[in-house]
Image (tube, rainbow, N blue to C red):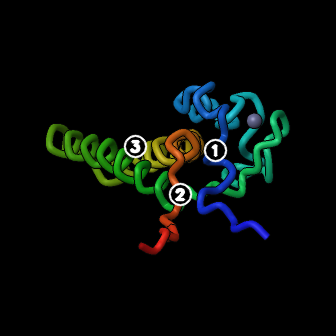
Amino acid sequence: MTEPSPVPAVQNDPDRQKVSPFVAGLTCRCPRCGKGKLFSGFLSLKPRCENCGLDYAFIDSGDGPAVFIIMIAGFIVVSAALVVEVKYQPPFWVHAMLWLPLIAVTTLLPLRPMKALLIALQYHHRAAEGQLVKRNPQ
Ligand SMILES: [Zn+2]
């Protein structure tokens, strides 16, 4: 019986450098071939690539996409709200009419490409959970 490799098979993939992670991520495509769809729903992933068969079980983007979107959208919306309030001092219903749609647009639209981008970068840079490696005793 052979010992399991401490490095998952996906990390030894020779096709890793063929597709730009930014192109694959921003088009929500497979990080290896750049052609197969990554998502089966809004944010749920397919089990594997329909084009090249890459198993998506290695994917673990966690809360990363949401954190980036919260930071970017928060900066845009809060900055815009502060500028409008200081410059025009509109009634509160104007703030609600302006910022609620802006919040929806700046959070929901980029969330899917951001998740795909982080997945493609994870694949490209072989990011994985740390593992203990056995060393030869001396
Ligand atoms: Zn693929």
> Which quadrant of the picture is home to ligand 1?
top right
Which picture quadrant has residue 116? top right
Q: Amino acid at mark 3?
A: Leu
Answer yes or no: disc 3 within 8 Å of ligand 1. no
Report, in whole angstroms, how far the alpha carbon at label 2 lies from the one at label 3: 41 Å
Q: Amino acid at mark 1?
A: Asn
Of badges 1 and 2, the one in the foreground is: 1
| Callout 2: SS | loop
For disc 1, the neighbor class at 10 Å (few under 14, some 14 to 19, many from 20) is few
In the displayed structure, would residue 117 be above or below residue 33? below
- Front residue (pair 87, 82): 82
Residue labelled with disc 3: 98
Query: Residue at 60% of width from left, 62% of height from top?
Result: 6
| Callout 3: SS | helix
Residue labelled with disc 2: 128
Mark earlier in primary sequence (1, 2): 1
Mark earlier in primary sequence (2, 3): 3
Total number of numbered discs in the rendering: 3
In the displayed structure, would residue 92 be above or below residue 114? below
Q: Position of residue 82 (x, y in %)?
A: 21, 46
Answer yes or no: disc 1 within 8 Å of ligand 1. no
Q: Amino acid at mark 2?
A: Ala
Query: In the shown orientation, is residue 16 left or right of residue 78?
Result: right
In the displayed structure, would residue 29 be above or below residue 112? above
| Callout 1: SS | helix
Report, in whole angstroms, how far the alpha carbon at label 1 lies from the one at label 3: 49 Å
Residue 12 disc label = 1
